[in-house]
Every structure is written in C-alpha cells, then in structure tokens.
Amino acid sequence: MSPLIEAIDLEKTYTDGTRALRGASFVITEGEFVAIMGPSGSGKSTLLHILGFLDPQTAGTYRFEGKELKDFQPNELARVRNEELGFVFQQFNLMPHQTVLENIYMPLYYSNVPKKEWHRRAEEAAERVGLTHRMDHLAYTLSGGEKQRVAIARALINKPKLIFADEPTGNLDSKSGDSVLETLNGLHKEGHTVVLITHGQEIADHADRMLFIRDGRLESDTTKQV
C-alpha cells in the first residue's frame, strides 16, 4: 500500500530560536492507528501541526498522498484540511450556545456538500458516536465525554481519510476517556487512519504502532506484536 504520509528529516525552528523538531523521519500508510508519544515539550504538537497542514516545517520534506507540501496551492490545502483530515483536540473547540447538530455540521459551511445533505450527514456522524439522543441539546449542557464525542462526530462529517486526535482524553475522567478511545478504535476498524497524540503510555497502548519523540527527535518506532 502506498504511503499516506511521508516525513523525511522534518525540522521546525521557531522565530525565537527554539528547535522543536530535529530531523524526524517516518512513513504512515492508510489504515494504520499510530500513537505519537513523548513528554510535554517533546515536539508532538509541533509535528501534528505540520502533518495537519496547520504550520509548515522549516526543513525536510513532507508528502501527503505522494505530493509535497510545497506543491499544494493555498485553496487546495484548505480543501484537504477540510475534506480529507479530521481534527479532535483536547479543548473540544465547540460553539457552546449552538446545538450538537449545529456543531457537528460546522465544517460543511466550507465544503461543496449541498445544504440539503447537511442534516442527514450530521445525523449519521452523531449515530456513529452514540449521540442521536442529544442532537438538539446545546453544547454547553453536555458532559466532557459527550463534548468530545461531538468533536469526533464533527471530525467525521466530511468522511476524512485521516483523523488526528491531540490528547483527546486530557480533559476527561477515566470512564469518559475510555469511551472516547473505544470510539477511535472503532473508527480505525472501519478503515480510518488515526494518529493519536499523547504523553501517556496507557493511552498510546490503544494504537498498533508508537512513535516516541523526545527533545524533537524520533527516538523509537515500534509496532505492537499481535
């Protein structure tokens, strides 16, 4: 299977001189469940921002579906971010006074999906995370676990190839966190590629493969033995 992501000697140096990444190289193929793990400040989030087209690298090569980042036009990058990538963050990033339904279909405002399809797509996404009974509830009335499941449903609305989950259980109790991880596991089994950012070994153990980063360097790349 051809690579979905190719990272070759990726480096990131910020304007203040901080070197957040120091030559990370790896390949992720479609359908994998990969955890990127490391302590706080190791470069995990920086790497996620590069892989998700949120911030460019300062050196090295990044290819998505065989095409280098530098060869994407701005409008094409925006389309890929919205339609082929789904993002789930620790802070949920919901509109608190909008309903679950309205939050889920937010990415459709920037897509070519006809408006008459929005409600059906949102219902499908809500059903996949077990939230059809909360569709008309305002986001601020939900529990933390429910908010994160709304965020996952929103990430799924455009049927992306790749889902990035950045510390998705960081603000949740253990029970809600387990539910979110079960949802990500289910999406992986359905064929989605999942990249999970975490600093916890117990969370990383849900993935089939782990990339461990320390001080901006990729220290290890291990695959779970079946």
Image (tube, rainbow, N blue to C red):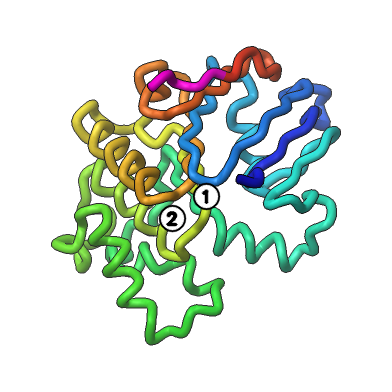
Observer-nearest residue: 143 or 84? 84
Could you tell me which residue is drawn at 77 percent across and 31 percent down? 10
For residue 127, the mark is none
The label shown at residue 155 is: 2
Q: Of 83 and 223, which appears nearest the observer? A: 223
Label 1 environment density (alpha carbons within 10 Å; few <14, some 14–19, many ≥20): many
Number of disc labels: 2
Where residue 22 sits: x, y (%)? 77, 21
The correct choice, above or below, for 61 with respect to 106 in the image is above
Residue appearing at x 36%, y 63% in the figure: 104
Specify the amino acid type for callout 2.
Ala
Name the N-terminal-most of marks 1 and 2. 2
Q: Is residue 116 left or right of residue 193?
A: left
Q: What residue lies at 35% left-to-right and 42% top-to-bottom?
A: 184
Which span of residues is magenta-colored?
222-226
Q: Amino acid at mark 1?
A: Leu
Q: Looking at this view, is 65 or 76 the one in front? A: 65
210 over 190 or under it: above or below: above
The residue lying toward the viewer, choosing from 58 and 125, is 125
